[in-house]
Each structure stands twice: as C-alpha cells, then as structure tokens.
Image: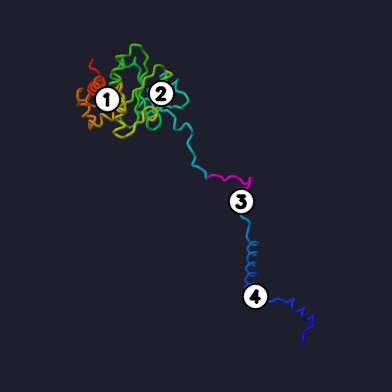
C-alpha cells in the first residue's frame, strides 16, 4: 500500500547523520568550548598604579667622612698646614708613626726645607721608624726657601733610596691639598705588568726613542741587561738607530742615577 503525501513529507524531515558528520560536529563543539573557556592573556605591562618593588635593605653604611678622615700625628700640633686641610675631616692620633695617615694604605711624612737645613738627619730617622706598613709612603716637602737646590738633592736621594714617593709643595695651601688627597691611585702611575710594557715605558723616556725603536732593540737584545751592556757601535747596527740616538740610549743606561758632584 502506498504512503500518503503527508506521511512521505514527514519521513523526509528526519535525517540520520553519518559517522563522519557526528565526528565533525563533536570536533566543532569541542573547539567552541575550548575557545570560550580559555582565559584572556595577562598584559605584561604592570598597572600604572602598582607600587614599585621595595629593594632589600642594605647594611648600614659608615658616615661619609669615615673613609676620608685624615689622622694627624700629635707632633704636628701648631703646624700651619693643618689650617689648609679642607674638604675632609681630620683628628689627632697618638698611635701613628707617620705625620698624616690618609685612608688605609697611604701615609705622609712632612718636612720643610728650613727645618731640614737645621736638622739634616731628622728625615732619615723618621723614614726608618715609619716601616713599610703602608702601600704608599709619601714624603711631603714644603719648599719654604729660595736656596733649595742642594737640600732638595739630598732629600731626593734619601727618598729614592728609601722607596718613598717625593712630593713638593711650594705653599702651605698646596701642602694642605696634598695632605688631604694623597691616594696610591692618584699619585703612582698605572703601568702594565708585562715585560714589554715596562720596557717601553722605560726606554721611551729617552729623548727621540719611539715604540718602534723599542721593538727593534728588544728583538736584537734579549734582555735590558744585554741592552745596557751594548756599545754605541752595536746599537747603531739596529735599523732606525742612528749615532745620536744610540749615544743617548747608551748614556741613559750607563750613567749613574745620582751625580757624584
């Protein structure tokens, strides 16, 4: 028996999905659900109203003047140089061998030319008592007289033999500045530790000797001792070393450091 038209139309309304359609619909449902449930990514920029992070507390520091206080020997009471020490604190101390102690590695002995002429043996004894407890030992000399050539020669010799740095001050104000600012890194030149750097620094102090000359000399003479023992004629055999330059090098390495006269 044939179906009526109404029943045929009702039958066409029902659709049985295939397996592929079911899987596709399930995947679409899962994708939509995942999209809805995902949280929005947080912004990397902190809110403007967020308070700045508080850094960890640092250890309490000493007063600003703790590392710049100059210790003054009691023997220096009445020295007019003290009135010229500015921008740093200073205080008397009975426990120091130097006249001034600046920081933990520098000390100063003070001497005036006039006093040295009256007591020439004084400074040698002070240097001997000073010892070598400081990395930088300074002999600060106040040039307070015009007739200073011979005394300065004596003082320079004493300082050189005692491994003491010599500083000259031509006024009380200058002596005061030196007393408050002496530091190892401010006074001593920084020189590289390599042999070639030291050799270059030494030989280029000779007039007209260049770094290229130092390379030439070092390639022909293995050590500074060999170079010092070379004659003028042997030096002139090096390329770029003429008679005049060879004589200057020879004289610089063979003349005494301190004049006998």
Residues at badges 4 and 3 in contact (C-beta under 8 Å)? no
For discs 2 and 1, the disc positioned in front in the rendered view: 1
Q: How far apart are marks 2 and 1 (CA)?
A: 43 Å
User: How far from the left and from the top, in percent, is residue 127?
Assistant: 30, 25
For discs 4 and 2, the disc positioned in front in the rendered view: 4
Q: How far apart are marks 3 and 1 (CA)?
A: 70 Å
Q: Name the residue tied to disc 1.
A: 240
Describe the element under mark 2 as helix, strand or loop.
helix
Specify the quadrant of the image occupied by residue 253.
top left
Residue in the image at 56% along x and 45% along y: 54
Q: Using residue 101 as the reference point, say whether residue 65 is left or right of it.
A: right
Rate crowding at label 3 as few (under 14), some (14 to 19) or many (20 or more) other CA atoms within 10 Å: few
Q: Distance between the residues labelled 4 and 1?
A: 100 Å
* For marks 4 and 2 on the same chain, the one whose residue lies earlier in the sequence: 4
* For marks 3 and 1 on the same chain, the one whose residue lies earlier in the sequence: 3
Describe the element under mark 3 as helix, strand or loop.
loop
Describe the element under mark 1 as helix, strand or loop.
loop
Residues at badges 4 and 1 in contact (C-beta under 8 Å)? no
Residue in the image at 28% along x and 18% along y: 154
Q: Residue 178 carries which label?
A: 2
Q: Which mark is residue 256?
A: none
Specify the quadrant of the image occupied by residue 197.
top left
Residue in the image at 62% along x and 68% along y: 27
Question: Of all residues shown, which one is farthest toward the bottom?
Answer: 1
The relative height of residue 47 versus residue 227 in the rendered view (above or below) is below
For discs 3 and 2, the disc positioned in front in the rendered view: 3
For discs 4 and 3, the disc positioned in front in the rendered view: 4
Q: What stretch is highlighted in magenta?
A: 42-55
Q: Residue 18 carries which label?
A: 4
Q: How far apart are marks 4 and 2 (CA)?
A: 100 Å
In this rendered view, identify the residue nearer to me: 164 or 77. 164
Q: Using residue 15 as the reference point, say whether residue 188 is left or right of it.
A: left
């Amino acid at each position: 028996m044939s179906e009526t038209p109404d029943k045929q139309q009702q039958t066409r309304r029902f659709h049985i999905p295939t397996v592929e359609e079911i899987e596709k619909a399930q995947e679409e449902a899962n994708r939509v659900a995942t999209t809805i449930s995902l949280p929005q990514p947080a912004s990397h920029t902190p809110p403007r109203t967020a308070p700045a992070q508080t850094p960890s507390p640092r250890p309490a520091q000493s007063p600003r003047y703790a590392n710049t206080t100059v210790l003054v020997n009691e023997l220096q009471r009445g020295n007019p140089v003290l009135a010229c020490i500015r921008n740093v604190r200073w205080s008397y101390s009975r426990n120091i061998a130097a006249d001034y102690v600046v920081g933990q590695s520098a000390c100063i002995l003070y001497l005036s030319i006039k006093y040295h002429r009256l007591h020439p043996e004084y400074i040698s004894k002070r240097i001997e008592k000073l010892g070598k407890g400081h990395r930088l030992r300074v002999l600060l000399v106040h040039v307070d007289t015009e007739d200073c050539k011979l005394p300065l020669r004596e003082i320079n010799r004493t300082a050189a033999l005692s491994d003491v740095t010599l500083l000259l001050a031509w006024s009380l104000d200058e002596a005061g500045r030196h007393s408050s600012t002496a530091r190892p890194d401010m006074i001593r030149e920084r020189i590289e530790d390599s042999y070639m750097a030291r050799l270059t620094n030494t030989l280029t102090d000779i007039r007209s000797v260049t770094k290229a000359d130092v390379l030439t000399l070092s390639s022909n003479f293995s050590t500074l001792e060999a170079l010092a023992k070379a004659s003028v004629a042997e030096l002139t055999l090096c390329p770029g070393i003429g008679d005049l330059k060879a004589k200057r090098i020879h004289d610089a390495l063979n003349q005494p450091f301190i004049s006998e006269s």
